[in-house]
């Protein structure tokens, strides 16, 4: 690793973050970065990804490191590179150089971390090797990050409060991730007519992200089967008449994510049925974004999407009845079974390692309603939050062929009319939106989403 | 996952493999496939990679599955997909369909695996969640796969014996991986003059691999600092006069790897010093491959590479003295500090999870000599083995600036002459070679390695 010296404000930003943390907690905290996970043998690992909580306060993706945060100060614990490591991995920055670049107050070898263990809170990282170290050094069993207790829970709440509203440096990173993601999607559209498989479009899109020296923030979805919500298969041939759904996002070197979905026609022309549904989803997308401003309940934005989709499907004759009755019955969720979006930051579902602690305002819990149970965010919006807005329409066989649901919604769905929309298996339109002081800013606005512009991009040579 | 029905010989191949296993062991074995490792939160995982030992006998990359092998029979243990999984991940094949496609003799839910635990050998997988399951079900602590004991060690030796010589199906997969890797390297050369960073070339190369619906078999090295042997940085700008070293390989859907390195001039033209060294490395590469045939000691091939490199460097005036003396003193290892190659199969360093059990013939141990300690393979070659041949030349600061080594090799190196080769930081030429009945076959022969042809490919538009 070389220190990215172009992050000139990094030390100052990190100092601000830990001083704000000190306003919320009055006990020390230790955050670990984690270790690589091995793939098929110990030396062949997955790419290193530092814990997001560590990254938020330590800035750089340092492997096998820890930071001790106390009263607004940061102490860095990391070992110097061994001579063998220098042979294989090249010269690494010295600990004191790293410490300087992140504005650490002091720095020590990792072994000295034990001296700071007393009374320190922490949050469990993802790799179990490091989790064992955490337990061992703190002298206690860690609870899962999704069910924290005591000071660990207090720490998590404090961190969530900070990470919910992004500072300037965070927004600068999120904009970089967004810009590369926009470029990847444009390339994906352009590459479609020269691709025979879904994988071809994926290669073109991820190639752009890799070329910008970024990883993907999550497993890409690039599929003609958009109705499989978390599809990770890329082997289907592209056929004229198919819609291709691509949910692909870049992550910056410092770990900040983008999350964008577009759906386009493989042959560059939406069929009339595809276009009808596309425009409903786009209307929901646009009106949800228009509604975003501080003080608005995110759940109301979700319900707005549900309402617009319901109304559109009634107008197309796919749903039957009063909009309010259909919504009450969650009829929209037959075709839009997920939430309208989620928090975005260092994680693509930001802070989801903490369960619903970040996504749900204190005292709120997930609904068990069909139309709400998958909603990941239920808070009043505040300036500095970044959320995704991603309404969709899907014909999921597991839902539409379910006998219980068929019976329940028998009269609310015009099943014959629905059959005419067989060429619309899945559509989603997703952008990343910053809540500003008096409205919102779409970080991914440079990527067109109107049907005609999408068609133009697909046809572009 | 859909069952890849194009693998028509899979069931027969797997049956042959387990029947051969039964000739070596007379106790049952359970092999687990493993779980996904989480990246930054539980739902955001690294791509699944099944354990290679599991893949060898079960064929398909099934998540969270196990196989029970006994007396030539295979029983498959895997749970049916849950309804929630069907909603998010689509229809999955039924257990009995999977069982049929891999020719399993019986199939059961995973919970029934406990009934087969008594007296079964195993090998620990990479992810710790599954390792805990292994311990729990077998009722004993597992030793690390690098230090096996008892029946586990006997099982590992038997598997290594089988996996050392590839059958027809394995070779067919290795050829597929090789073909895509060749294409990726050609694309990398072609993309170089349009790239500003190393990352640009990496994106072009990995884009090809992804477009063929394959993952990379290992972390790509694409760098102008080839002297950093395991370089994983891609941020350096490409400058005319630089050499770019690319060590990139694809892996098939069933897990079989390729491992190829080429080194090319960024501007399409080797300097005379770069060309001089390149031709020495190429001579070592070609002569090593010529020597490959059954019965030859792989260590002798390594020593041949050392000898050719030493002779070349003496002819260029970089090394001084008698070839035999220089080799005796490991002077070549100043510039060629790694082994000439390794086994290749389901792992890019095949079976390296077993330590040197597969790489080193029984009774042999790693040398501690500077020139031999990194040699990963020390066996007599046999038909069906696939090995890499990858000689190189590097100016590694950690070696050449080491005061102890400078003193030891003071008179053997013409340091002034060496300075004239400052534009040769790292060169490696690596191909994948099958040992045949009476010689060898280069699986990656479609990728040129002669300097002029490399230059042509870089200049191609």
Image (cartoon, coloured by chain):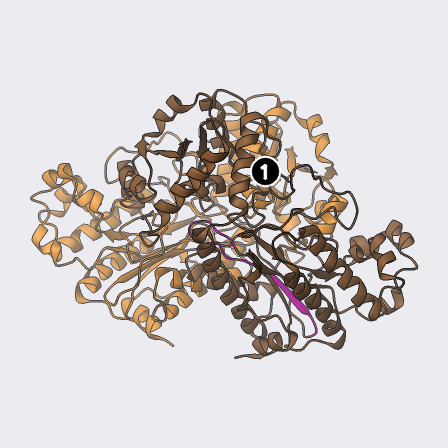
Chain colours: A orange, B brown
Magenta span contains residue A235: no
Near-viewer residue (A432 or A94): A94
Instruction: Judge left or right: residue B252 versus residue A316.
Output: right
Q: Is residue A93 visible?
A: no
Near-viewer residue (B129 or A57): B129
Answer with the quarter of the image where residue B361 lies: top right
Answer with the quarter of the image where residue B325 lies: bottom right
Badge 1: residue crowd in 10 Å (few <14, some 14–19, many ≥20): many
How far across and how far down the image is residue A358, in percent? 43, 37
Question: Which residue in the protein does label 1 denote?
Answer: B354
Instruction: Judge left or right: residue A455 versus residue B410.
Output: left
Q: How many marks?
A: 1
Near-viewer residue (B405 or B159): B159
Magenta span contains residue B253: yes
Instruction: Judge left or right: residue B281 versus residue B150.
Output: right
How far across and how far down the image is residue B156, in percent? 54, 35
At horizontal 51% and vertical 51% (from top left) the residue drawn is: A256
Near-viewer residue (A142 or B394): B394
User: Magenta stretch: dominant SS?
Assistant: loop
How far across and how far down the image is residue B213, in percent? 41, 57
Q: Is residue A40 visible?
A: yes
- In this picture, which residue range is highlighted in magenta? B241-257
The answer for which chain carries disc 1 is: B
How far across and how far down the image is residue A100, in percent? 72, 47
At horizontal 28% and vertical 54% (from top left) the residue drawn is: A225
């Amino acid at each position: 690793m070389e220190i990215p010296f172009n992050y000139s404000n990094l030390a100052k930003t990190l100092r601000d973050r830990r001083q704000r943390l000190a306003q919320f907690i009055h006990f020390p905290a230790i955050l670990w970065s984690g270790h690589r996970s091995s793939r098929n043998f110990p030396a062949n690992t997955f790419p290193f990804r530092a814990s997001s909580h560590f990254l938020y306060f330590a800035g750089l993706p340092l492997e096998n490191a820890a930071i001790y945060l106390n009263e607004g100060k940061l102490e860095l614990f990391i070992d110097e590179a061994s001579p063998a490591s220098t042979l294989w991995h090249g010269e690494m920055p010295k600990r004191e150089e790293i410490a300087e670049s992140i504005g650490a107050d002091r720095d020590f070898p990792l072994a000295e971390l034990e001296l700071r263990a007393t009374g320190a809170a922490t949050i469990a990282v993802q790799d179990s090797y490091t989790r064992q170290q955490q337990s061992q050094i703190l002298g206690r069993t860690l609870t899962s990050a999704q069910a924290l207790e005591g000071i660990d829970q207090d720490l998590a709440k404090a961190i969530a409060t900070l990470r919910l509203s992004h500072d300037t440096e965070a927004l600068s990173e999120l904009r970089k991730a967004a810009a590369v993601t926009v470029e990847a999607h444009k390339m994906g559209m352009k590459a479609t007519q020269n691709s025979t498989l879904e994988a071809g479009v994926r290669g073109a899109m991820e190639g752009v992200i890799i070329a910008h020296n970024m990883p993907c923030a999550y497993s890409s979805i690039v599929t003609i089967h958009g109705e499989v919500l978390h599809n990770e298969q890329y082997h289907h041939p592209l056929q004229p008449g198919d819609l291709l759904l691509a949910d692909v996002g870049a992550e910056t070197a410092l770990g900040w994510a983008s999350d964008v979905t577009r759906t386009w026609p493989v042959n560059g022309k939406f069929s009339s049925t595809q276009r009808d549904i596309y425009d409903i989803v786009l209307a929901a997308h646009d009106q949800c974004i228009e509604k975003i401003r501080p003080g608005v309940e995110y759940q109301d934005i979700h319900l707005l999407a549900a309402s617009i989709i319901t109304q559109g499907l009634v107008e197309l004759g796919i749903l039957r009845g009063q909009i309010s009755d259909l919504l009450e019955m969650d009829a929209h969720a037959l075709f839009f079974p997920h939430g309208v979006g989620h928090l975005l930051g260092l994680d693509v579902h930001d802070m989801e390692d903490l369960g619903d602690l970040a996504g749900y305002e204190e005292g709120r819990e997930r609904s068990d309603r069909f139309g709400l149970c998958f909603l990941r965010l239920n808070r009043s919006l505040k300036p500095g939050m970044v959320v995704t807005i991603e309404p969709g329409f899907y014909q999921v066989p597991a839902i539409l062929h379910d006998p219980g649901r068929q019976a329940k919604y028998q009269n609310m769905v015009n099943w014959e009319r629905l059959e005419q929309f067989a060429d619309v298996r899945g559509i989603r339109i997703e952008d990343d939106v910053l809540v500003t002081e008096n409205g919102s800013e779409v970080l991914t606005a440079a990527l067109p989403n109107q049907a005609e512009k999408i068609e133009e991009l697909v046809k572009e040579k």
